[in-house]
Image (tube, rainbow, N blue to C red):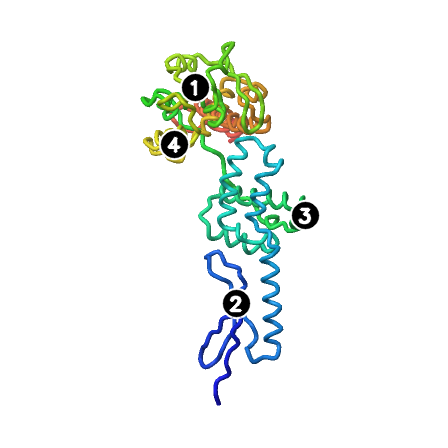
Amino acid sequence: MPKRKLPNLEWVKYVHSKGKVYAYFNTGKKNFRGKTIYAPMPHPSAINFHDVYAAMKGARTKRAEVAYTIADLIRDFERSGTYADLSASTQRTYGANLKRVDKVLGRFAVNDLKRDDVQFVIDNEDMGAGAHNAFLAVLGVIYTFGRKRGKTDLRPTEDFDKRKTGEHDSWPEHILEAGLEAKHDRTRLTIALLYYTGQRIGDVCKMLWSDIRDDAVFVVQQKTGKKIRVPLMSALRAELNRTPRTGLTIITNVTGDRVSPQKPRAEVKKFVATFGRPDLVPHGLRKNAVISLLEAGCTVAEVASITGQTYKVVEHYARQVDQVRLSSAAILKFENKRGQGKTSGKPAKNASNSSGGK
């Protein structure tokens, strides 16, 4: 008996295995490895084969006609007033993470994204704790944007927890002191501005010579929009006096043009790596500034007025400073107490054991 000819249908492939025929439908979707997803179909001789094929073909055709992808959602978000109202620094932060979302999820239809898809990305992309949190945050932001515009009802990130990122380490004293005397002019200037003003590197790189007046530097923070007056410390004034004014900004390239934060950040990272501390980052100097101000006796309000941080953040650092101070004081008292009772290097006796209770 001659073999039955298999129907030649669009998007259907047949697999012959162990004398049997299996039919699969090309869904038009791809998995994260870029491979086409095929859906199993009834046997070609089954009575419902053509009905299933018609349904699958109709679904694929309809999806192709009306599919609104995550890439589309990202483009609409970037053109929106919501995005335009963000600060420049937040837009830059979002931009890097939107590219990552677009790269790994952009081809998905907005309403096809499942929690398992997001989990797959998290499990297979090389993301540290900070990148993990940023990825989920931005994905959540664009889906919130999509819900408000009636594009979707999905909340694909709501069941994920943030990972603990920890704090940026403050710089050890010997590295900080070496940085303030670094031979490389821009590295030294960058470190001085970061430490003596307590500002973020993005704000430091935007500082203009014209921002310095009345013996202070005036800052408008990119992240918060806060306007801050930071009085010039004598050490910073000396560093600025030795810096040539080759452009409008204080930190410039060799032609006197403003530089993006990436270049000074890389130079600072290279500097700390010579001390075996590649984990230290420019932002750690903001913590150094806060701690130095607190140790000098400044109040939480005084510190916050310089750094622009919230009282809650400064109070967190204040508790750390107090812990160091109090623990040192406690040990000193303990040592003094031991010393008072010593006669020949032996621990002092308790008062209850020193009376003549024979």
Residue carrying label 4: 266
How many marks on residues? 4
Residue type at tag 2: Trp
Please name the amino acid that badge 1 sits on. Ile
- Quarter of image, res 44: bottom right
C-alpha separation, residue under disc 1 versus residue under disc 4: 18 Å
Q: CA distance from mark 3 to mark 1?
A: 47 Å
Alpha carbon distance from label 2 to label 1: 62 Å
How many other residues sit within 10 Å of disc 1, few (<14), some (14-19) or many (≥20)? many
Look at 65% across and 49% down and name the residue there: 151
- Whether tag 3 and tag 1 are in contact, CB under 8 A, the answer is no
Residue 260 x %, y %: 44, 29
State which mark lies toward you, 4 or 2.
2
Residue 2: x and y in percent read 48, 87
Number of residues whose C-alpha sits closer than 10 Å to that of mark 2, classed few (under 14), some (14–19) or many (20 or more): some
**In this rendering, would 54 be left or right of 252?**
right
Q: Nearer the viewer, mark 1 or mark 4?
A: 1
Q: Is residue 349 visible?
A: yes
Label drawn at residue 250 = 1
Disc on the earlier residue, 2 or 1: 2
Q: Is residue 215 left or right of residue 244?
A: right
From the image, state whether disc 2 or disc 3 is nearer to you: 2
Q: Amino acid at mark 3?
A: Gly
Q: Residue 142 occupies which quadrant of the picture?
A: top right
- Label of residue 150 in the image: 3
